[in-house]
């Protein structure tokens, strides 16, 4: 089945530093990837849609300069949390689709970010 | 904004019992999908039902869709402790493949 690898699974960083999270589709090409944020015991909040070779589309209220998304190839998208603050601490999850009609999303295992 | 709304928010049952979770949505859909999330992990796709389908089965899972009521249900039969997880419905998946997730139902199956 389709596999999405997300790395790292956990990261602790100091306030003011930047953190990069990688999302890779291992056995399919993903023209579209999605980045979500999830707070404890809550649903997934879509942050942005990442399209290979073009700029990401951010959801309303998501700061594009803070959450930098790069989708440089058909198998890799990265999310960089810049100048992280404690309020950025959260669970970040990526998903990818082979972009076929009715194809489900395939999710990475998420990244637990803690900013101290 | 959330499109799907699951009900109940939490459900606790004994192993062997059936678990039923419901999802309501607001706008017209192409399909509705159900996902499962174990604590601290990503989501796993369970089943997709198209708007012209009324019922679909996959192993111990049974999904129904009522587009007139804008609702769907997920039934897990003969539940096991390993079914303990959060279950989300999701709608969307149109030309931009973007899904909107509901708030989820936390299912606890006690051994």
Image (cartoon, coloured by chain):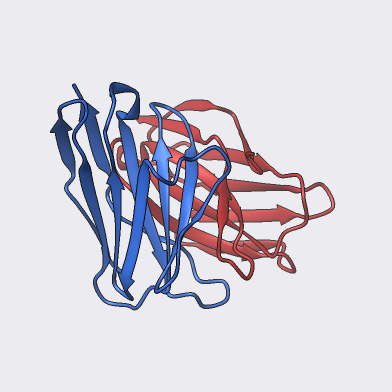
Chain colours: A blue, B red
Q: In this view, does A33 lie above or below B75?
A: below
Looking at this view, is B11 or A5 the one in front?
Answer: A5
Q: Is residue A72 left or right of residue A95?
A: left
Residue A22's x, y, as percent? 23, 56
| Quadrant for the N terminus of chain B in the image | top right
* Residue at point 47%, 52% (across, down): A48
* Residue at point 18%, 44% (across, down): A9
Toward the right, the furthest residue is B68
| Quadrant for the C terminus of chain B in the image | top left
Q: Is residue B93 left or right of residue B11?
A: right
Residue A51's x, y, as percent? 44, 68
Numbered circles on residues, count: 0
Q: Can residue A95 be seen in this view?
A: yes
Q: Is residue A18 above or below residue A70?
A: above
Q: Is residue A110 left or right of residue B101?
A: left
Q: Is residue A59 left or right of residue B69?
A: left
Q: Quadrant of residue A6?
A: bottom left
* Residue at point 33%, 76% (across, down): A74
Q: In this view, does A17 lie above or below B29?
A: above
Looking at this view, is A15 or A40 the one in front?
Answer: A15
* Residue at point 56%, 55% (across, down): B99
Looking at this view, is B104 or A80 the one in front?
Answer: A80
Residue A73's x, y, as percent? 30, 74
Residue B9's x, y, as percent? 55, 27
Q: Can residue A1 be seen in this view?
A: no
């Amino acid at each position: 089945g389709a596999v999405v690898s997300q790395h790292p699974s956990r990261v602790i960083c100091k306030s003011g530093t930047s953190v990069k999270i990688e999302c890779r589709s291992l056995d399919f090409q993903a023209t579209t990837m999605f980045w979500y944020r999830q707070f404890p015991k809550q649903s997934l909040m879509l942050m942005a849609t990442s399209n290979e070779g073009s700029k990401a589309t951010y959801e309303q209220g998501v700061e594009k300069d803070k959450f930098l998304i790069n989708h440089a190839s058909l198998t890799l998208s990265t999310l960089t949390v810049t100048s992280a603050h404690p309020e950025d601490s959260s669970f970040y999850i990526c998903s990818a689709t082979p972009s076929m009609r009715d194809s489900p999303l395939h999710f990475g295992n998420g990244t637990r970010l803690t900013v101290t | 904004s959330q499109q799907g709304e699951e009900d109940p928010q939490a459900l606790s049952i004994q192993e062997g019992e059936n678990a039923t979770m419901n999802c309501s949505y607001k706008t017209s859909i192409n399909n509705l999908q159900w996902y499962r999330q174990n604590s601290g992990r990503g989501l796993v796709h369970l089943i997709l039902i198209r708007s012209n389908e009324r019922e679909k089965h996959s192993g111990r899972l049974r999904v129904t869709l009522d587009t007139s009521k804008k609702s769907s249900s997920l039934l897990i039969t003969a539940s096991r402790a390993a079914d303990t997880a959060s279950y989300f419905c999701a709608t969307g998946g149109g030309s931009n493949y973007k899904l909107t997730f509901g708030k989820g139902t936390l299912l606890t199956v006690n051994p």
